[in-house]
Image (cartoon, coloured by chain):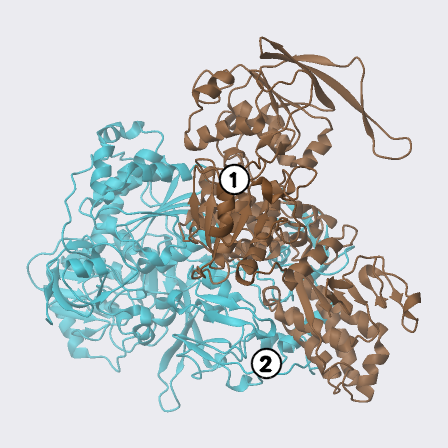
Chain colours: A brown, B cyan
Amino acid sequence: MSKVYFSTWNGEHINNVGKPEEEWEESAYNLPATYDDHRDSKAFIGWDGVALFKEDVDVIRLAMEYAAQYQEYSEACGRCAPGRWGGRILYDQLDKIARGEGAVADMDHLKEVSKSMQMTSKCEIGKTVPNPILDLMTHFEDVFMDCIDNQKKSIHYDSDVSYIAKITAPCTDACPAHVDIPAYIEGVRDLKLDESLRATRQTMPLAHTCGRVCPHPCEDACRRTNLDEPIAIMELKRIGADYETDHGFGFFHPGKGKKKKSIGKKVAVIGSGPAGLTTAYYLAMDGIDVDVYEELPVLGGEVTVGVPEYRMPWEKYQQDIEAVKDLGVNFILNHRVTVDEMREFETSYDATMIASGTRISKAVRCDNERPEMQGYWGAIDFLDWVNLYEKFNIKTPASVQEQQMLPSDHVDLTGKTVVCVGGGFTSMDVVRCSIRAGAKRAVMIYRRDEKTIIRNTTYEEYHEAVEEGVEFIFHSAVNTINDEDDVIKSLLIDKFELVPDPDGGRAQLVKIEGASETIEADYLIPAVSQSADLEFLPEEWELDMTSWATIKTNGKDYMTSRKGIFASGDCEYGPMTIVNAVGQAKRGASVISRYVQSGEVTLSDDEIMEDHLRKMKVYDKKEKVTGWLAGVPRAHSEVLDVDIRKYNNEEVNFGFTQEQSISEAERCMRCYYIAMVAN
Amino acid sequence: MNDKMINFKIDGIPVTAKKGESIIEAARRVGAYIPTMCYLPKTTPNASCRMCSVEVKGQNGFVLSCNTPPVEGIEVITDSEELYKERQNIMKMYNVNHPLQCGVCDKSGECDLQNKTLDFGLNEQTFAVRDQARKKKKWGVHTYDPGLCIMCEKCTAVCNEVIGAEALYIKPGGYKSEIDINMKNCIECGECIAVCPVGALASTDFKYTANAWELNKVPSSCAHCSSACSLYYESKGESIDNVTEKIYRVTNDADFTTLCAAGRFGYDYENFVASKDSQAFQKAVDTFKDAKNVYFNSMITNEEALVLQKLKEKLGFNLVNEEAKNFQKFMNAFASTAGESLYNATHSDLKTSDFIICLGSAVASDNPMVKYSIAKAVNHKKAYVSYIHPVKDDDIRNLVTQYIKNEVGSEEAALAMIANSFIEDKSSQEEFFDSLDLGYLSGESNIALEEIELLKHFSKRKKAFTIIIGEDVINHPESENIARIVGLLQKESEFKVLVIPPQTNTLGVSQICELDEAVEGLSIGYNVKADFTLSAKGNGDLDMPALNQQEGTFVNIDKDLVSLNAGVKYSGYELNDIACALGLETENVIEYTPELGFGEITFDDLPNSIDPSGNITRGIKIESKTNTENALVEPVEDLDEFNGTVVYSCNPLDQFNVFTEDCKQIVEKKSAGNYELIASKQFATAAGLKPGSVVTFSVNGQEFVRKLKVDKNMTGTVAFNPNFDLDMISSEYRYNQVKLKVENE
């Protein structure tokens, strides 16, 4: 909690004016009183109020500079009458008062124009910019009137004060890749689909992918939820990507869209999954030469060999990869990096990004669990062979065929019973692929309940699986694997119930005695979690590791304990989402880009602000939303009929029709906010 | 999506909203007024002005009515003290630093800003902002004054959504934001000028020439292509000394309708005739008595076409219009398999299609409105557009999803492949389908079977199919058999068919006249060079009124009988005078309207109106007649090969005929590219030509002298040769092998 001199943040009223500093009441919020390790903040001003950390803040100039920021952020303003003119009136009137030329009537005009902006602006940014300004005018009226009455400049009008501002939105803040979501939605609404895609690619190169298979944490932070239902944020992302692909345009890269000339720096990236691709994309954009090393014969990492064709068609993911290639990134396939090479990379490259993912399936931890048994098949390996065949027609080698009792050169499960232990996306992919591979039964063993599995994946994912005939056994776990001559025959499944903690703690899972049952099974596919394969790291580097045996960084600049060696994605965080890998890699690339040029590991002011805001959380689920009609339904795209999709690998989700895209985009409330720190 | 109707109230009036309707659309439908500054019904809402905010009972804050659909049971209030106050404040903001120059502004008198400033009783300005310098810009036919611009975004919306040009864009920057242009993409259609609610985007030519209230507004139909769009001629006397009325500009109901540049700027083709030349008239009457042939083209009203038909019947001459005759043949053959006489699609079908094939048309210049309708379909329905043509048109890439290049001459093969792929029930034409050798067709047309498979694949989830058939096919050597395939598609497949009549009134003429082959002997030409020429261009033996000086009707591409009114007076003789002298007693040519065979409606009763929701009632629809022939489609003929140098008769954008040829603003446009043979670098190299080389060549007996222009966006070995400057309208296949002779080397 921050010590403040004054705060109206999020409705609080803390006024320590006139009190000695020791007696200052603290703010209930985690405000950025300290900007970074060498800068203290004087004030924080944002959509929801203002906080002063010091006594001598020039409140008039603070208000004026905040209004000025609104003028700066052109992508978010100038596109509605109240915002375009109102915002300028705010700024001009405040500046007039601050420079000692204000009139009493200016205060009234400011209030009037503020109200019009709050009532009628197009975006939340226009509606909220007046909030902290009005707070300052109300609580520091004497300061304003003093300048007006005596026609004098505000106290620090001519001093050198630095202001750091950032535009954000609840969805953007919640997105690990901080995608400018309102901008790409606006592109769809404006039918400027190239601009929509450019907006996405500012921080997210994988628009096809994250427009299809992202678990969309942004939607949990969508302000529209406070009114009715969240915007279909994820699905609107693919609109721009599909447009680019459908019309065979070149690639709509962000900014001016041009490749930068090589600056003569080289970076090695280990792994071509989402984190590797993202690192390569943004480094290449800065003119850095990138070599990406990929162990598999195909590019794309787990999205290629893990995510099935029916959810993420290779044809589309390939477009995302082509966009990276378009910037001149060099990919080296079928190349597993060795320990010696890693040592060598330290000199042959200016930096290295490790983005090798987590590709070892963890054990279920039950009795008689022996990987050498026939029918025991790790989810990662299982999905590899399914996807390599479905997407690239790469046949399953004889050794795997024999081990897994396959009748032919691909994963054919006709007549078999597949039991998967999991509850996350990977396990869903396993059971749904099993259905498509002809399995007689596909069973999911999950320790917790239906609600939790939906929370861990998505509503659509779960329901589509149920429709396709996957059986879910909740509150259950495998106790023992029963085999005959090392061939799996059946499983003993324990059942649990959720017993509430009498002390009000978290409910506990307690085994129900006597309820265990044995189910026939040909395969047990563990999909509980994965661990990182990091054998290529030189031991003498002694990289710091997390307790999960992943590579440790500070989660901000993504440098490992060894200078010049960075890590992002699942090998850093542990098995997580695509968008998380993208977000980490994007930040990592930005740090690397500065590092290879200056030798320093730094964060930009914008990135520091981004982290502060993330800590504060932009989304407030209790906020009452006004100015929008509640009850406008969310669009749902058509999906492939279950009786057809069960038997093929065609993309299940058709995507929005244009009418759906537009009406869904029109539901977006454009909740842009400006946050600013004075220091 | 919610398919059910939504019941709610607007100012206490119960309203039922349709699917996809916004509050403001429902309000306008029931006549409730909600003020707006940026709302343009034909595009998706810009939501920039915020004037259309309304209140909803029980909800805090305002709701924007333009982009919010109603929800069951709500009660909308369109006006209240608070709404009035905020709307007034918005108008106040719009007026901050808006130059007080209404006295010299073109828009004065028809300016939304002016009107609503008065409406909202703004007597004083309490807001102030330091002004900034803003530079005026001249962009070809338009002039942009950012000082007057209110950033309503109507211009950018139409440029993108309606025209599909994507030239105008918003240059962001808060208060400094303004409209900017990518001139490379601009086709100077003037649509942005039409929708600008203030004086910011003005016509460079019209600027400072007239005030809105001085102009006489005459509704008519554009005479340049078969879309025959609705427009208004706006005219006034030139000066106190010269009260002869002149057209100053063309406008349209821009909230709902659209015009291309030819319609908007190509209006000054009237034939000024000071007095009646009775000598020439008598000669004309006498020549008619002796004439063996009367040539004419389809730049003619239905009524005059009927006059010619009646004269033919009376005098026995041969009535010759090869272009219309080809179209007649095409449509007859079409009817023989379609089961009805007319194609069944209209512009509105096209606009709402989600799967479009365009075959045999350089659509952007052949019929700009068809291109705009495709743009609407792409933008609003995410239409899949397959453009099948030997020449790739880079300018419509943002509209086309799949370009299929076919060999010159292979349109029949292409259509046969499409029919084979899209007609499920092949039983009615078993022989034809059995005869198809797809491998051969693919080889000859150079269309890979995979391309057709892809086309079929992407049609899978589509719901509204339209195939556009252009002039290349109508004037094809195998035209009739192609027409039978097209007819079959209309009858047996999901496709609706839209045939583009090659000239303005080709469809009307083809329905009215019995057309003949020419014979040896004395010939009269109506707007066609002959022994005796009647000319609306003023370069013949007797002057005739131009189409902007006549009353009459056209049948447009939508099969609507639409009316023309005279934008400018004409003082000379007209065809009806000749007919009267030859014994057809009718005082006014429009008395023939009920006799055209399109229904007994009189000219004056032809409707022309738009309701507040934008429903257009214009003219009457002509009926398709049942045809029970059930003709058999013949096997696809072996293809003639087109090798060497091939030119394609295709006009530059906005040039259509000898009438647009001299229109001042069209001639001045950069895109008009007059009289040039336009070709790719590849073509130039192959023919050993340099840009600027003057070449002569002959197409169907017509000699051409053209300067070569190399277009770096073009590919392939077919060059575009304009023919708008010929008074005889081409009726031959548009591709020709030619021998080029270099003149200036």
Point 17% across, 61% down: residue = B295
Depth check: give the residue in front, B282 or A360: A360
Query: Does A388 appear above or below B593?
Result: above
Extreme-front residue of the structure: A540
Q: CA distance from mark 2 to mark 1?
A: 70 Å
The x and y percentages for residue A440 are 56, 16
Crowd class of label 1 (few under 14; some 14 to 19; many from 20; radius 10 Å)? some
Nearest to viewer (mark 2 / mark 1)? 1
- Chain ID, mark 2: B
Q: Amino acid at mark 1?
A: Val
To the question of a shared chain for discs 2 and 1, the answer is: no
The x and y percentages for residue B697 are 12, 63
Extreme-top residue of the structure: A484
Q: Amino acid at mark 2?
A: His
Depth check: give the residue in front, B566 or A615: A615
Describe residue B598's horizontal placement relative to residue A251 as left or right.
left
- Chain ID, mark 1: A
> Would residue A119 be visible to someone looking at this image?
no
The x and y percentages for residue A339 are 52, 39
Point 36% across, 91% down: residue = B241
Mark number, residue B98: 2
Extreme-bottom residue of the structure: B241
List the residue tagged with mark 1.
A339
Crowd class of label 2 (few under 14; some 14 to 19; many from 20; radius 10 Å)? some
Depth check: give the residue in front, B247 or B183: B183
Describe residue A95's horizontal placement relative to residue B637 as left or right.
right
Query: Does A674 appear above or below B113?
Result: above
Depth check: give the residue in front, A637 or A135: A135
> Would residue A606 be visible to someone looking at this image?
yes
The x and y percentages for residue B532 are 13, 69
Query: Does B313 appear above or below A315?
Result: below
Please identify the quadrant where the C terminus of chain B is shown.
bottom left
